[in-house]
Image: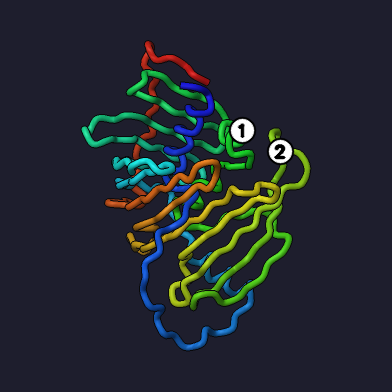
Amino acid sequence: MNKNYRILWLISFLVGGIFFLPACKSTKPLVRKSLETMSFDQLYQKMEKNKPTFSYLSAKLGVSYNKGKKEPIQFRAQMRLKNDSIIWMSIIPAMGIEAARVVLTTDSVKLLNRMKKNYVLGGYHLLDSLMHTSINYDVLQSLLLGNSVSYPLTDSSVSVDRQQYLLTMKMKIPTNSTLSGDHFLTQKIWLDPDSFNIKELYLSESGMKGKDLQVFYDEYQNINGITIPLKMQIIIHAKEKISIRITYKKAEINVPHGFPFIIPSKFKKLI
């Protein structure tokens, strides 16, 4: 397994929720009254009020993964998240035995591949080196929870598109060791005019032609007064399109769990 393939395989599981484009349904749009005129700041504040506030989240996920023209792969995953700290995932294929384990912290990436008996330990440069962009913990957590990505804002606008509020933001990406010069991220967010939840999210980085991210939040759920996604669709547009569908089958809020990551002695380190 060459290095690039290993890293791409890693990303596919890390992002159990990162970039994507949905299959559109042929339905007539609902007839609505004209949307109330609101400023960017007003809409942004309403969106931020929906941001889930919790310490711990655990969930069982149903995942459909498709790369290029290959047949989709179906698998289950367990996810545990400590807010602003750690994301832990256990990947379980059809036979019901754990195939891989992923742990993401604010500064590290870890992958345990039980099927190949190897493991990966490193930083987010593993993602940067393949995608030539700056993916970090904050971005991954935001997308999994249905939140906007927050970088320093340089420009913004608001409009109405398909009976939804459309927020367009240009943001400056903080520099890191793998990116030189100024890099900017364009983020477009389509807000539901009633709930102000994010329905669609689009990310595109300056200088990265042909690579972008779209997230479609098909449904949300309310757990103990906290709103999180129920169904998501994800697509990574790069050399090959990677499509990921995620369904939160069962979720718990503020029930602490451990984040075990034990490397068997006979496993080989890849990176």
Q: Is residue 237 above or below residue 147?
A: above
Near-viewer residue (59 or 167): 167
Q: Amino acid at mark 2?
A: Leu
Residue 36, by quadrant, is bottom right
Q: Position of residue 182 (x, y in %)?
A: 76, 47
The extreme top residue here reads: 266
| Residue that label 1 marks | 129
Q: Amino acid at mark 1?
A: Ser
N-terminal label among 2 and 1: 1
Q: Residue at x 55, y 38 (%)?
A: 106
Disc 2 packing (10 Å; few <14; some 14–19; many ≥20) = some
Disc 1 packing (10 Å; few <14; some 14–19; many ≥20) = some
Q: Residue at x 33, y 46 (%)?
A: 63
Near-viewer residue (165 or 48): 165
The extreme front residue here reads: 69
Q: Position of residue 185 (x, y in %)?
A: 66, 53
Q: Residue at x 48, y 61 (%)?
A: 51
Q: Quadrant of the N terminus?
A: top left
Near-viewer residue (125 or 107): 125
Q: Is residue 145 above or below residue 127?
A: below
Residue 26, by quadrant, is bottom left
Near-viewer residue (128 or 142): 128
Q: Position of residue 205 (x, y in %)?
A: 65, 50
Q: Is residue 228 above or below residue 43?
A: above
SS at circle 1: helix
Residue 107 can be seen, yes or no = no
SS at circle 2: loop
| Residue that label 2 marks | 179
Question: From mark 2 to mark 1, how far is it between C-alphas?
Answer: 10 Å
Q: Residue at x 51, y 46 (%)?
A: 140
